[in-house]
Image (tube, rainbow, N blue to C red):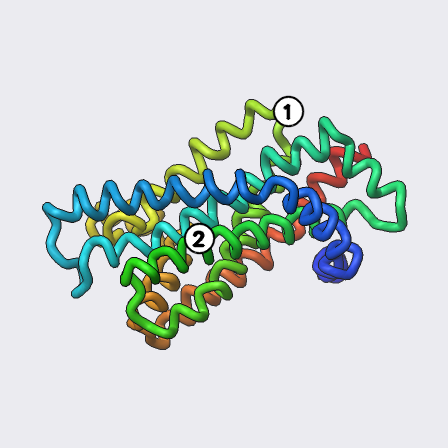
Amino acid sequence: MKMLLHDYGALNAYALRVFRRNLAVFRKTWKTNIAFNFIEPLLYLAAMGWGLGAFIGDIDGISYMQFIAPGMIATSAMWASASECTYDSYVRMHHEKIFHAIVATPIHLKEVVAGEILSGVFKSVLYGTVILVVISALGLVASLYSLFIPLVLVLCGFTFSSLGMIWTGIVPKMDSFSYFFTLVVTPMFLFSGVFFPISALPEAVQGIAWFLPLYHIVVLLRSLSTGAVSSALFIHGLWLIVFNLVIFPIPIRLIQKRILD
């Protein structure tokens, strides 16, 4: 337990310096990055909402477009943080040797990993908030509870940044990230209630879907977006907090083992 608490201490001022370093680089490329990352979920929203939505009635009292719009926020945030802490972190670690250069300073490797995760959290909040602003402008957000959505995006960012860094700590080469996106991220995208309620799935699949972190993120975002807020949401928030507390030390250990051994 003492060692685990020691890992959580990596979220300190040194980790913020690593994040600020990545942010300085992002400032040079943000226009291109934001354009491509938020256009894709909007294309899904338009195609599924206007196209498929024309053949589907209301779901839980809201239109199909309103139903999938919060899912687009969640998936944009998920892809952004997962990409930041897989491909981008791997390039910084393996090809550019940024990690090696930073640990030559007083900054410890665990704080480098924490800084990378904070960079993923930033991307999650930024990209998710951009989608939130767009769907709000389209009249698809019905509640002021949506002001709390960035807080959920922080949890989303920690979740998929940590999962991405775990993969970064174990892959032998960059091509292996395709396994992560095909076997982990894409199933969450399809079976977490983004496009339809998971109650439509077979019971066994529903049970599996409940344990997917994206499912809880989608439920929280949809509830805040529509104003359907109840005490049951605490279960979803608590599940995400516990999940993050459990997995956060894992990428720190893996990256340390990879670089220091």
State the SS at label 1.
loop
Q: Nearer the viewer, residue 32 or 70?
A: 32
Q: Position of residue 39 (x, y in %)?
A: 40, 42
Q: Residue at x 56, y 50 (%)?
A: 123
Q: Earlier in the sequence, mark 2 or mark 1?
A: 1
- In the rendered image, the quadrant that contains the C terminus is top right
Q: Position of residue 162 (x, y in %)?
A: 59, 48
Q: Residue at x 70, y 59 (%)?
A: 8
Q: Is residue 80 left or right of residue 46?
A: right
Quadrant of the rendered image containing residue 141: bottom left
Crowd tier of the residue under label 2, counting other residues whose Cα lies within 10 Å: few below 14, some 14–19, many 20 or above: many
Q: Residue at x 59, y 54 (%)?
A: 122
- In the rendered image, the quadrant that contains the N terminus is bottom right
Count of numbered labels shown in the rendering: 2
Q: Position of residue 23 (x, y in %)?
A: 67, 49
Q: Is residue 255 left or right of residue 83?
A: right
Crowd tier of the residue under label 1, counting other residues whose Cα lies within 10 Å: few below 14, some 14–19, many 20 or above: few
Question: In the orientation shown, which residue stands out farthest toward the bottom?
Answer: 231
Contact (CB < 8 A) between labels 2 and 1? no
Provide the residue designation for mark 1. 172
Quadrant of the rendered image containing residue 149: bottom left
Mark 2–mark 1 Cα distance, whole angstroms, equals: 26 Å
Q: Position of residue 233 (x, y in %)?
A: 38, 70
State the SS at label 2.
helix
Above-or-below relation of 238 to 187 = below
Task: Say the numbered circle drawn on residue 213.
Answer: 2
Circle 1: residue type: Pro
Q: Nearer the viewer, residue 184 or 82?
A: 82
Q: Is residue 41 left or right of residue 151?
A: left
Q: Nearer the viewer, residue 125 or 254?
A: 125
